[in-house]
Image: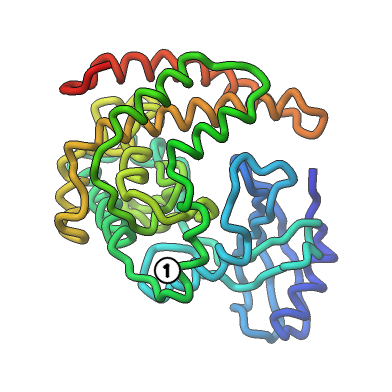
């Protein structure tokens, strides 16, 4: 478990922000995050370029990342690009490339007001508020998938997309010390029924309700960009709409938040004609297979000597449930033979 010490942080921030003095009011370790450690920091500054009273988020690479990420440096550069394009993302402030603060590379950004417990935040919303929030989300994702990035920056995210998603899932399966016949069969089915359309765009890589911040009924932020890559935009949409991320709100197909029709309408306004929506059921199956593999790998992390968490045990058990969901999805997939 990595520690973030107030004295060390205050000294570092004073130097990096050109402040005369920095006082750390509080440091809170945040839960969640498969590949990052995250802290919320309240600090006051005397002088320097930050506001006198600031709330910051520090994200540090994990010792045991679940999946390959673009790296702290590239995530920092990406956030700068997205912020300049008016996306609802945290403003990046500082980089700790050497791991001085936590032992691993880290970035510091401004905290965005909002709750990442998106399902809880929307449970009390009326139908009109849900519609508005769903349209906010669709607009931001459509805008992302339409984003044109300069060629000298495109390379930052190309590497993760060089291998097809199905090939990446096979690679994850090979890392497990036991066989998963349902997953192996599902991957063969996905290969056999792969859609012909091969459009590419910048993908978030983990676009789901847990990475959306909501405040006062509106979308205020999109977080956790470490899995950004070049891929099919339906990867993001299928992941967002997969049943496994709706947490019981099955009728709200757009991330457990709202109606898919509202999401599609807003997405199409921002990025018209970019995707074939008839392919979405296929990408929901891809998403469920991907989450099943992640769940199995999370469970294995608990058995190691390095990480012991009840959350990981429960996630590992979820893998078996997801395998059953995969079989149902493929059985009900219309127009494609098993």
| Label 1 neighbour load within 10 Å: few <14, some 14-19, many 20+ | some
Q: Is residue 232 left or right of residue 7?
A: left
Asked if one can make out residue 261 in the rendered structure from this viewpoint, the answer is yes
SS under mark 1: helix
Q: Residue at x 81, y 65 (%)?
A: 100
Q: Residue at x 46, y 52 (%)?
A: 161
Q: Report the label total.
A: 1
Q: Residue at x 29, y 49 (%)?
A: 198
Q: Residue at x 41, y 56 (%)?
A: 230
Where, by quadrant of the figure, is residue 220 drawn?
A: bottom left
Residue to which mark 1 is pinned: 82
Q: Is residue 85 left or right of residue 68?
A: left
Query: What is the quadrant of the N terminus in the image?
Result: top right
Where, by quadrant of the figure, is residue 300 drawn?
A: top right
Q: Is residue 332 left or right of residue 228?
A: left
Query: What is the quadrant of the C terminus in the image?
Result: top left
- The answer to whether 204 is drawn above or below residue 126 in the figure is below
Asked if one can make out residue 124 in the rendered structure from this viewpoint, the answer is no
Please provide percent x and percent y for residue 112. 49, 61
């Amino acid at each position: 478990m990595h520690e973030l010490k107030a004295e060390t942080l205050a000294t570092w921030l004073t130097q990096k922000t050109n402040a005369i003095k920095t006082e750390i009011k509080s440091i809170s370790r945040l839960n969640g995050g498969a590949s990052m450690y995250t802290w919320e920091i309240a600090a006051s500054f005397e002088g320097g370029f930050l506001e006198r009273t600031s709330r910051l988020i520090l994200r540090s690479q994990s010792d045991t990342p679940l999946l390959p990420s673009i790296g702290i440096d590239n995530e920092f550069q990406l956030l700068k690009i997205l912020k300049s394009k008016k996306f609802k993302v945290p403003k990046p402030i500082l980089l700790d490339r050497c791991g001085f603060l936590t032992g691993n590379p880290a970035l510091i950004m401004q905290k965005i007001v909002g709750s990442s417990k998106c399902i809880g935040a929307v449970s009390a919303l009326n139908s009109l508020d849900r519609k508005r929030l769903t349209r906010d989300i669709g607009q931001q994702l459509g805008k992302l998938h339409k984003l044109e990035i300069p060629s000298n920056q495109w390379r930052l995210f190309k590497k993760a997309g060089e291998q097809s998603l199905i090939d990446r899932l096979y690679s994850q399966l090979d890392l497990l010390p036991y066989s998963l016949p349902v997953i192996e069969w599902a991957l063969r089915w996905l290969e056999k029924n792969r859609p012909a359309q091969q459009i590419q765009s910048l993908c978030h890589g983990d676009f789901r309700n847990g990475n959306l911040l909501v405040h006062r009924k509106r979308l205020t932020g999109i977080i956790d960009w470490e899995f950004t890559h070049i891929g099919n935009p339906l990867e993001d949409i299928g992941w967002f709409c997969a049943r496994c991320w709706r947490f019981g709100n099955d009728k709200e197909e757009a991330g457990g938040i709202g109606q898919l029709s509202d999401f599609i309408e807003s997405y199409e306004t921002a990025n018209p004609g970019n995707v074939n929506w008839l392919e979405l059921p296929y990408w929901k199956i891809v998403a469920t297979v991907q989450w099943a593999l992640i769940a199995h790998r999370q469970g294995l992390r608990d058995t190691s000597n390095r990480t012991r968490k009840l959350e990981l045990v429960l996630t590992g058990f979820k893998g078996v449930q997801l395998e059953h969901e995969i079989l149902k999805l493929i059985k009900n997939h219309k127009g494609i033979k098993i």
